[in-house]
Amino acid sequence: MQAKIAKHAGFCAGVRRAVKIAEGTVNEWERWYSLGPLVHNHAVINYFTEKGISSIERLDEITAEDCGVIIRAHGTTPDIVHQAEVQGLKIKDATCHLVKRVHEIVASLRGEAYEIVVFGDANHPEVQGIVGWSDNTAIVVASPAEACEIKPVNKLGIISQTTKDEKDFFEVVNALLHKSKEIRVFNTICSATKLRQQAARELCREVDLMLVVGDQMSSNTATLKRECATTGVPSYQIQDASELESEWFKGISTVGITAGASTPDWIIKEVLDRMTEYEENQDTNQENEDTNQENQGNEELFAKMEAEMAEYKTPSRGDVIKGTVIQVLDDEVMVDVGGKSEGIIPLREMSLQDVDSAKELVNVGDEIEVLVLKWDDDGTILLSKKKVDSKKVLDELEKDYNNDNVLEGTVTGSVKGGLLVDVGITAFLPASHVDDGYVKNLDDFVGQTLKFKIIEFNRNKRRGSQIVVSRRELVVEEKERLKKEFWETIEEGQTRTGKVKRIVDYGAFIDLGGFEGLLHVSEIDHKRVEHPADVLTEGQELDVFILGLDREKSRVSLSRKKLLKSPWEIALEKYHEGDIIDGTVVRIAPFGAFVEIDPGVDGLVHISQLANHRVEKPEDVVSVKDEIKVKVISIDPEGKRIGLSLKEALNDAEQEEVEEYLESQDDNTDY
């Protein structure tokens, strides 16, 4: 007969912590009491009774002075804690940290005016403690049927006893969904409980019989027994080895063993030992060619069990150890770090980056490296993943620093004197090292991913940044490379795209990607530009024409005007002979008047075209700044000349008036 033990069985972290706290009181001179059974296991209770720690049900049973009370792993109500303080009792709180979290959730929900439903056993001490944190207003339900009887409310909060089955919990939640328009659900079932149930179900597929070891008072053990039974495998719950019955094992080749969270390891060992005796008795009465092989397997299993239950070497502060994630909450992660020990990683110690929830970082089952921050006297191990990650990042950055490597980082914010850069950890970029010159607005760099070199590295620095980076040298090197490339490829007559770098009174300097050229104000546009800023803005991208090169003096003359259509080109496309257009008299000559029809485009109204009568002087008809209508009578593209006529424009206007009058007369004729 072969025995197999579930991967997760026996004491959970909360129970182990409570036992350790109780053991710590044994040698103290005060008399200590446990408020209710420390855990739901008679063997553990008897063990502590022999050590002098009595279990009481009410605080008023303590009448002597210099006494203390241990709050058991199941927790208690705030009223009882207050009563103990008033009574002058010393208090050691062994409440499981997961149960404490449930207390905090309940108190928060109560403060926000939620009606609270607890899925669990109303007579269980954990549930009674939870109800106390709701000012005794919470409703306890044990099944979906009981949940359906609850009256609708405005706001509903739903939680669970930590040792319940998750599937049953969600059936209760489903039954409550129509009871309120606003519902908050908190899955407060302990991961250790879920892991034990999952491991037990998996083991049931490999065995002919299951033994569930745990006290009859234990809720999670009862749930384990039910989970095993539902798989169809014969399952028995026993408190210890004395309850084993030999007839259970007749015809059985493989036995599975699991244990509740309050079952100590020595009881599991006793069960294994007793099963070996049964196997030896069976071997004397029957022949089995596989007996020797099975005996060897059981011996190995027993040896493994002994090793796992041996004194575990407690990791010290500063040790880096591997662990497996067994529970992920928004604000903390529980990690199995071996030796049947679990530790807690607060959210602040999970990542080098700011995150809202630990669920963004890890999942149950992930193997991670953590650093032991401290091991509290109460057995809680405080861990940090961030410090391990930080060390790894610093190790890599130290290599980059020693090898003068270039690395990438993202600018995350600006501070006094510089910028913050994410290079795996936060580094400091001094303002003087942001560029190769003065930077007017550092905020322009926030969000950009750039390249840097480390110029200062000190992993032991306690104030200020451990890492100081610079991009000034890289910027200079890049500009030199681009400058060399620029002069190797630039030629007069090319068109290049550039960016306005600086604007001055006489023009603008254009960054051509490695070199700056001058766009003189006279080359900005065909029309007169009073100041370059009237047309251009810093940072603007534009195409420019390479007007001239002076390689000896490293000067480049640019033109924007060359790439724009001239006013005459636009006018030739826009106007045609016979068009009546508006214009402004800009100059008068003896032979006629010049009229501006577009900025930079003038046409001539010859003196003969000013009026229908003989004109002695043009100023007798028009004056400078007069706005007049003229008719286009000739266009000379090659000579860039346009002939205009005021006379014909007036004649056309009069003719149009006559035609309109005649049409109106026809409309008024009475036939």
Image (spheres, rainbow, N blue to C red):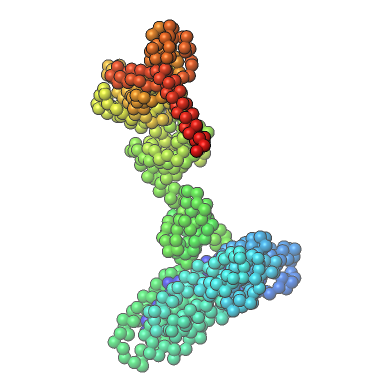
**Quarter of the picture holding the N terminus:** bottom left
From this view, report whether residue 46 is shown above or below residue 645. Answer: below
- Residue located 64% across and 62% down the image: 109
Which quadrant of the view contains residue 25?
A: bottom right
On the picture, is 212 further left or further right than 542?
right
State the image coordinates of residue 40 (x, y, percent, origin top left): 58, 75
State the image coordinates of residue 224 (x, y, percent, origin top left): 50, 77
Say if residue 5 shows up in the picture. no
- Residue located 50% across and 59% down the image: 333
- Residue located 74% across and 69% down the image: 64
- Residue located 49% across and 76% down the image: 259
**Foreground: 248 or 106?**
106
On the picture, is 294 further left or further right than 23?
left
From this view, report whether residue 463 is shown above or below residue 228. Answer: above
State the image coordinates of residue 528 (x, y, percent, origin top left): 41, 18
Q: Which residue is situated farthest in the bottom direction here?
A: 285
From this view, report whether residue 221 is shown above or below residue 110. Answer: below
On the picture, is 64 further left or further right than 488?
right
**Foreground: 30 or 132?**
132
Which quadrant of the view contains residue 303?
A: bottom left
**Foreground: 665 or 584?**
665
